[in-house]
Structures are given as C-alpha cells and as structure tokens.
Image (spheres, rainbow, N blue to C red):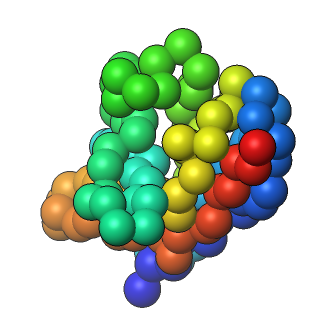
Amino acid sequence: QVQLVESGGGLVQPGGSLRLSCVASGNIFNIYNMAWYRQAPGKQRELVASITKGSSTNYADSVKGRFAISRDNAKNTVYLQMSSLKPEDTAVYYCNFQGSTPPYDHWGQGTQVTVSS
C-alpha cells in the first residue's frame, strides 16, 4: 500500500508565505504526475498546480506568479511554495500522485491552510 503524508500547513497572515510538502511511502513506482488540489468550504475541489515527470508545470490562474510547485524524485516528494498569500487561498490542500505500470492515482489526507486578515 501507498501512503502520502503532508506537512507545512497552518495559519499565516495575508502576504505571508508557506511551504507545503507531501512525501509518499510504500511500494510506489513510475510517478509521472504530482499535483496539489484545494477545497474551500462550500466549494468544489480545484486543481492548484501540477508537475510532470519532466518537470513541466501548470498553475491555476488564481495562483500564477504566487505559487511554485517542485518535485524531488529521489525522495518521492512534491512541494508547493506559496507566497503573497491571500484570504481567498484558505482551503484544505491535497496532494495527488499519478503513475502507470500499473496505473494508479493516490491522494494525501489533506492539510489546512488558513490565511487570516
């Protein structure tokens, strides 16, 4: 089995920075895509950022220029560096790993990020 463990969430003031980490443990191979999602109360879960095995990145329009996703393949870890945080960024953030051979789609447990005014 595979487990994804997140860390780095918490309370931060507007304009502040936060760095999220998500590390996978267990029998996992061929991680192609890593991603961060978030879900605010009463809203649908949305894709925040993704990164491919070749380190190609994609960001939601709402976080472009403020968030940066990166990965460390040797550590099976994905990071999300968040800066210039806004109250609208408040949400539960989830990590996701996708791969193949065989195909899989694993999720983290979620971590709360709160940006207070």
The answer to whether residue 31 is visible is no
* Position above or below: 96 against 69: below
The residue at 66%/57% (across/down) is 113
In the image: residue 102, left or right of residue 60: left
Measured as percent of width and height from the top left, residue 35 is found at: 40, 46
The residue at 67%/33% (across/down) is 85
In the image: residue 80, left or right of residue 116: left
The residue at 53%/42% (across/down) is 88
Q: In this view of the protein, which residue sits in the foreground, 102 or 104?
A: 104
Q: In this view of the protein, which residue sits in the foreground, 41 or 56?
A: 41
Q: In this view of the protein, which residue sits in the foreground, 2 or 94?
A: 94
* Position above or below: 57 against 115: above
The answer to whether residue 47 is visible is yes
Image quarter in which the C terminus is found? top right
Measured as percent of width and height from the top left, residue 102 is found at: 18, 66
Measured as percent of width and height from the top left, residue 97 is found at: 38, 56
In the image: residue 110, left or right of residue 36: right
Answer with the quarter of the image where residue 53 lies. top left
